[in-house]
Image (cartoon, rainbow, N blue to C red):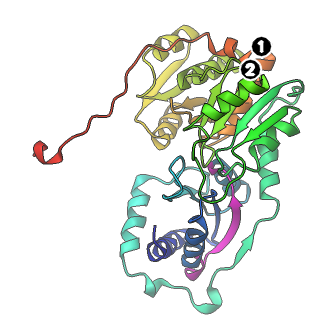
Amino acid sequence: MDPITVLRLGMAIGLEARKKVGARVVVGKDTRISGYMVESALVSGLVAMGVNVGLLGPMPTAAIATLVRNLRASMGVVISASHNSYLDNGVKIFDGEGIKIPLELEEMLESNVRAELSGNLAQVRDMGKVYRIAGAVGRYIEFVKGTFPKKLKLSGMKIVVDCANGAAYHIGGEVFWELGADVVVIGNKPDGLNINHNCGSLHPEGMVQKVLEERADIGIALDGDADRVVVCDEKGRLVDGDQVIASIMRHLRVSKSITDAAVTTMSSKSMDRYARELGVRLHRSEVGDRHLVDTMRQHSCSVGGEKSGHIILWEHSTTSDSLVAALQILSIMLLENKSASSIFSDFVPMPRVHRDIPIAWGLIA
């Protein structure tokens, strides 16, 4: 992710985006320090191709997917390396519908990064303009709150939220507070270097400890770009990702009569049996939220999830949104008048082992 490569990537994205009249791309990022460099280089490439750019600043990945639709933009770009350390960075690209672009288009963009594009530069009078989108944080907070049942409030509920010093550092706690909760926020002081460092969904120990200290009702940990959620109950016990998916699936089956759901091959085999008992057809995809979304669209699934914490509620989002998923969990607790430990106990995952096996590549040939 050096400046020259990112500049060329911006040009390649701009070449694709300007196929639509009035091309406009919205750009968001997380809090890692290299985001300043990547954003500047990417935007330079986009405006050089005649594309207008709206800057969102630090925002969750799902916020860009949502705002690209609301703002009728041509494409949306997220600058983030998700759960990785500050040393890494990357780019996620959404189309105008808030769906991650297909692999074929990704490959074409990669090819154009290596191609000579100087002949496609816009004339000076046709260069793009850059503006900062005012009120983007407020827009997204209102969207997230809008997914929560209007008749419910979080009053009387104490919640610990670990924002991973990432993209939701200024949003995570605010959403729950505005809905009436007593919120204890940790991991909300990013310095460009501490994103995902001993905090968030990768390191939920701090959240667990704070839940026990504060005698909170539930703990919610996000990752660097806030598309992944890890939960612990009021007893400080981490909840298996499949249990979170199963709880939401059960509730939606009862409340909205959903018929189809999706998980990846990483989910417990007991999910299949549980779904059958609920009367839900369960579809499996390859690992990765892109494949999960494809499977959900193919089978008209209402909910999809990965054991790692990516959860997609198609009624509200086209990609995984940790805050929307967290509010779904909290609404289940309130509607069923149950504790966190109770709503997750209905499903018991089969024991499983996941091991990485080192391979000496030279021996394979």
Residue 22 horizontal side relative to residue 104, left or right? right
Above or below, 235 against 81 in this view is above
Residue 365 horizontal side relative to residue 236, left or right? left
Q: Within 10 angstroms of label 2, few (less than 14), some, or many (20 or more) residues?
A: some
Three-letter code, disc 1: Glu
Above or below, 339 against 153 in this view is above
| Nearer the observer, 60 or 32 | 32
Residue 48: within the magenta? yes
Q: Position of residue 107 (x, y in %)?
A: 38, 60
Q: Position of residue 65 (x, y in %)?
A: 64, 51
Residue 136 horizontal side relative to residue 208, left or right? right
Q: Picture quarter containing residue 126? A: bottom right
Total tally of numbered discs in the picture: 2
Circle 2: element type: helix
| Nearer the observer, 332 or 166 | 166
Residue range (magenta) = 46-61
Q: Position of residue 182 (x, y in %)?
A: 86, 32
Circle 1: element type: loop
Q: Within 10 angstroms of label 1, few (less than 14), some, or many (20 or more) residues?
A: few
Residue at 41% across, 72% down: 113
Note whether residue 83 is visible.
yes
Above or below, 207 against 319 in this view is above
Q: Which residue is the site of mark 1? A: 336
Three-letter code, disc 2: Ile
Q: Which residue is the site of mark 2? A: 332
Residue 237: within the magenta? no
Residue at 45% across, 19% down: 268
